Amino acid sequence: MTTATAQSTDIPGTVVTPARLRRSAAARRHRYSRIKMWLGAVCAGVVIIPVLLAQVLPLQDPVNGSLAQALLPPMTDGHLFGTDANGRDLLSRVLHGGQTSLLIGCLAVLVSGAIGIVAGSLAGYYGGWIDTVVSRLLEAQMSLPLLLMLLLVVALFGPSILVITLVIAIAQWPEPARITRSLVLVEREKPYVAAARVLGLHRLTIIGRLIIPNILQQALVVVFLLLAQAVLLESALSFLGAGVQRPYPTWGGIISDGRQLFITGQWWLVTIPGLVIALLVIGVNLFGDGLRDRVRRTKAAS
Amino acid sequence: MTCGPSRWSGPDTVSYVLKRLGQTVLTAFLTILTVFVLLRLAPGDPAYNYAPPNPSTEQLEAIRKQFGLDQPLLQQFWTFLSNLFHGDVGTSFQFKQPALQVVMDRLPYTITLAIAAIVVTTIIAVPLGVWMARRNNTAPELGANIATIAGQSMPDFWIGFVLLIIFAVNLSWFQPSGFATWGELVLPTATIAILQIALISRLVRREMVANLAAPYITVARSRGVPERDLTWKYAFANSAIPVVTALGTRFAAMLNGVVIVEVVFKWPGVGALVVDALQRRDFPLIQATVLVTVILALVVQLAVDLVYPILDPRVRLGEASS
C-alpha cells in the first residue's frame, strides 16, 4: 500500500531496469523538484518580463486617461485589463506600478540578505557577546507586532521608496540571520576551519573567504524566497495606505484605490492586480522551493 | 495515561513561570517605550486632527494642553508610567473615554476571529499535512504541495476581496462587512485560514516526513504495529511539539490584530481600530492597543510552553533546552 512496502516487494530477484529506475523515489523527487522550478519560472516570468518591458511595450499612458473611457470592463476598446475610475488603462498601470514593487522587493531583499548573512555568520562564528546581542535582537523582533511597527515607521519617515525598502529589509533580516547562524555553527567545527586556524589566518578571512562560500548556496535560497515575502509585504503596506505614491502607484496601491468600487460591480480593479501579485509570488515560491530541494540533495550527497 | 498538574510540580516550573512572566513585563515595557518614542518623534501635530477647521493658535494650544502634549517628552513618559501603575492607560483623543475601555470593547471580536481561524486551521492542516507526509513523493502529493505553496503566496487582502466578490456580491450568501450575525464570521475566517492552513500543513508534513523515516518507526513496523498507529501514536506524537508551537505562535500573532483582514471586512476588532488610531494620531489608544495585545500574545506563548510537558513527558520546564 505504501511506497515503502511496494518497493521492498519489487527488489528481490529483479533486475534494475530503466523503467523501474524512473519510478524510484529519488528519480521522482528529482522530477518533482524540476516540475516545481519550471512551473515557478513560468509563473514568475509571465509577470516579470512584461513588467521589465513596460517602457518598450505599446501601452497607453498610465497616468493620464480620458474620463470618457472610465471604468471599462476588461477586453473592451483595446483595454485588455479594462480601465479605472479615471479612465486610465489598468494593464499599463499594473505593469508600470510593478516596476516600483519589484524594485522595492529586490532592494529590500539585497539589504536584508546582506545584513542577515553578515550578522548570522558573525554570531555563529564568534559566539559570546556578539551571539547574545544578535539572538536577543532576533527574539525581541519576533515578539513585536510587526505590521503595526512598520506602519508606524512609514508614518514617521514618510512613504518614500528608500524608507519602505529599509522597513521591509529590517522586517526580514531575522530569517537569513537565523539560517546563516545555524549553518555557520555546523561549518565552524569542520576540519578545514581548524586547519585554517592553525595556518594563522585571520578570523574574518576564515569567515569571509572559507565559511561563507561554503554556506552561500543554502543561504541564498532563503534570501531568494524572501523576495516573495517582500513583494507581499510591500503590497500590504500600500494597501493600508503606507505605500509609495508617485509617479505610479504600486500594486497594493492600485488595489486600495479600487476597493471602494468592487461592491458596485467593478471587480477587475481589485482582482486583476491581486492576480498579478499572486502569480509572481507563487512563481518565486515554487522556484525557490524546488531549488531548496535540489540544494539540500547536492549538499547531502557531497 | 497519567496527566495533570504533577507534570508541572516542583520548584523548577514555578521559577520558570515567574521568570517568563518577568520577561513578559520587560518585553511589554520595551515595546511600549519604543511605540511611545516613535509616536512623539513622528512629524505632524495630533492637535490638528481634533481642532475645528482653520484653528487659531490658542485653540491648538488648548488642545495640546488638554492632551498633555505641551509637556516635555520625559515628563510625558513619566506621567504615562505612573498612571500605568494605577491601571490608567490614558484617555482616547477621539472617543473621549478611557483608551483601555475602547480596546477591551473591541478585543472580543478579534479573539472570536482568531479562535475561529485557528480551530479551522488545525482541523484541516493537521490531517492534510499527515496525508502529504504519508504520500510523500507521489503525484497527488505534488499537487497538494503546489496548492499549499499557492495558498501561502496569495496576498490576504486579495483573497478577502475575491471571497467577497464571489460570496457576498454575486451569490449574496453573506453580508459584505461588519459583524451582525455569526454568518459574517465565515468569510474573514476563511481568508485567514487559507494562508494558515498552507503554512501549518507544510510544517506538519516536514516534521512527519522526518519522523516517519526515523529508525524507531522501522522497528515498530517490524514488530507489526498497524500503520495507523505508526502514523498517529508514534510519528505524530513526536511531531506534536513543533506543530503546537507554530499554532500557538500563529494564534498569538492573530491577537495582535489581523489588521488587513479586519480592514477588508470592516471587522470591528483591534486591528482595524489601531489602523484608524494611527491615521488620527490617537496616541493613548495606540499605546493601549499595543500594550494589551503584546501582553496577551506573550501570555498565550507562555501557555503554549506549559503544554509541552503534557505532550512530551521528557520535557522539564526550567531546564536548559538543547
Image (cartoon, coloured by chain):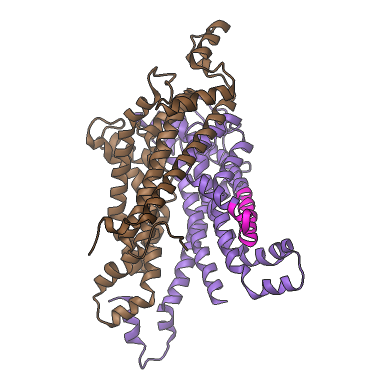
Chain colours: A purple, B brown
- Can residue B210 be seen here? yes
Q: Which residue is located at x 62 percent, y 54 percent?
A: A129
Q: Is residue A118 magenta?
A: yes
Q: Is B261 situated left or right of B65 in this image?
A: left
Q: Quadrant of the N terminus of chain B?
A: bottom left
In front: B173, or B226?
A: B226
Residue A302 percent location from the top left of the image: 57, 76
Name the chief secondary structure element in magenta. helix
Say how many tags the image has. Answer: 0
- Above or below, A119 against A241 in this view is below
Residue A161 percent across, percent down from the top left = 62, 37
Give the residue at x 46% y 65%.
Answer: A35
Foreground of the two, B305 or B235: B305
Q: Residue at x 42, y 19 (%)?
A: B94
Report x, y in % for residue A13. 36, 94
Residue positioned 66% across, 63% down in the render: A212
Which quadrant of the figure has residue B113?
top left
Within the magenta stretch, is there residue A73? no
> Where B50 sits versus B277, above or below?
above
Image-based side of A216 in relation to B295, left or right? right
Q: In the figure, residue B155 lies in which quadrant?
A: top left
Question: For this rendering, which residue is in front, A256 or B65?
Answer: B65
Residue B208: which quarter of the image?
A: bottom left
Note whether residue A70 is visible.
no
Q: Nearer the viewer, residue A210 or A223?
A: A210
Span colored in magenta: A110-132
Name of the residue lying farthest toward the front: B11
Q: Relative to A35, does residue B149 appear above or below in the rendering?
A: above
